[in-house]
Amino acid sequence: MYGWVWRHMFGPWPLKVIQSLILLVAVVALLFLVIFPWVEPRLPFTDVTVNNSPQPTAPQVPAQQPSDPFSSSG
């Protein structure tokens, strides 16, 4: 595919490099300005699978305070 595009561009290789860069910028602009905004509403980013119903949880164990090895008490 890229070889076909390269062979069909006109001019010497420096001009082909410039044409390739222009073509690349045009494709990226088309994607960001037209294609991605058109596709974005159709993607399921807002379809979350987490619901608000309460889930069974493990019993809560009170946290213990860590002992301080540098304290003067004890």
Image: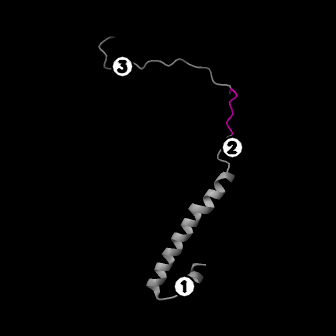
Residues 63 and 41: in front is 41
As measured in the structure, the alpha-carbon distance from the residue carrying label 3 to the one carrying label 2 is 48 Å
Q: Quadrant of residue 70?
A: top left
Which residue is painted at 64% across and 54% down in the image? 40
Query: In the figure, 39 relative to 72: above or below?
Result: below
Write down the region rendered in magenta: 49-54
Label disc, if present, on residue 46 of the rendered structure: none
Q: From the image, which quarter does the N terminus lie in? A: bottom right
Tell me whether circle 3 and circle 2 mark residues in contact (CB < 8 Å). Answer: no
As measured in the structure, the alpha-carbon distance from the residue carrying label 3 to the one carrying label 1 is 75 Å
Binning the other alpha carbons within 10 Å of mark 3 as few (below 14), some (14 to 19) or many (20 upward) gives few
Label located before the other in sequence (3 or 2): 2
Task: Please give the residue where the numbered disc 3 appears in the rendered image.
Answer: 68
Task: Please give the residue where the numbered disc 2 appears in the rendered image.
Answer: 47
Label located before the other in sequence (3 or 1): 1
Q: Residue furthest front?
A: 33
